[in-house]
Image (tube, rainbow, N blue to C red):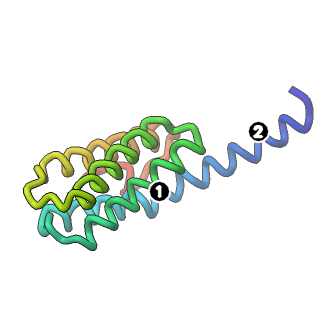
Amino acid sequence: MNDLESQLAAKIAIIKQEFLVRLQTEWLPNLRLLRQQFVDAPADEALRMELMRAGHNMSGSGAVFGCDDISTAGRQLEQRIRGMIDSDAADTDHREILGLINRLDEVCTAALRDANLSGPAAASRP
């Protein structure tokens, strides 16, 4: 690897680390808050939009930073909620949505653990 490639790899590693810190300190705690709100009010349309956005953001960022599990789980959540909104399905199985949220939480937690990040966001689930 030449010097330019080494510098680029180092910069990418720093940006990925920043993504993981943001995942730990912002995105995962927010996902957990949204999950609890969803348990309390699964028919809340604004909440569904927030969950869809969270899935979308995690899907895109996961793809960019090589976190394929996060990308896949985020995309599944986003697409399922989008389908629910587009079809205006009032009878949607909310356990399915909750399962997708839980799966996204699990893969985010695993990514943080694999990156050796620890702390309240990575250590426990409500």
Which residue lies under the disc numbered 2?
9
Q: Secondary structure at mark 1?
A: helix
Q: Amino acid at mark 2?
A: Ala
Give the residue drawn at x 20%, y 50%: 97
> Image height check: is 20 above or below 39?
above
> Image height check: is 43 above or below 87?
below
Q: Nearest the camera: 27 or 21?
A: 27
Which residue lies under the disc numbered 1?
57
Q: CA distance from mark 1 to mark 2?
A: 23 Å
Q: Nearest the camera: 34 or 85?
A: 85
The x, y position of residue 8, in whole percent, is: 81, 42
> Image height check: is 95 above or below 88?
above
First in sequence, mark 1 or 2: give its number.
Answer: 2
Give the residue drawn at x 29%, y 42%: 103
| Residue at the extreme left | 91
115 left or right, relative to 100? right
Quarter of the figure with residue 32: bottom left
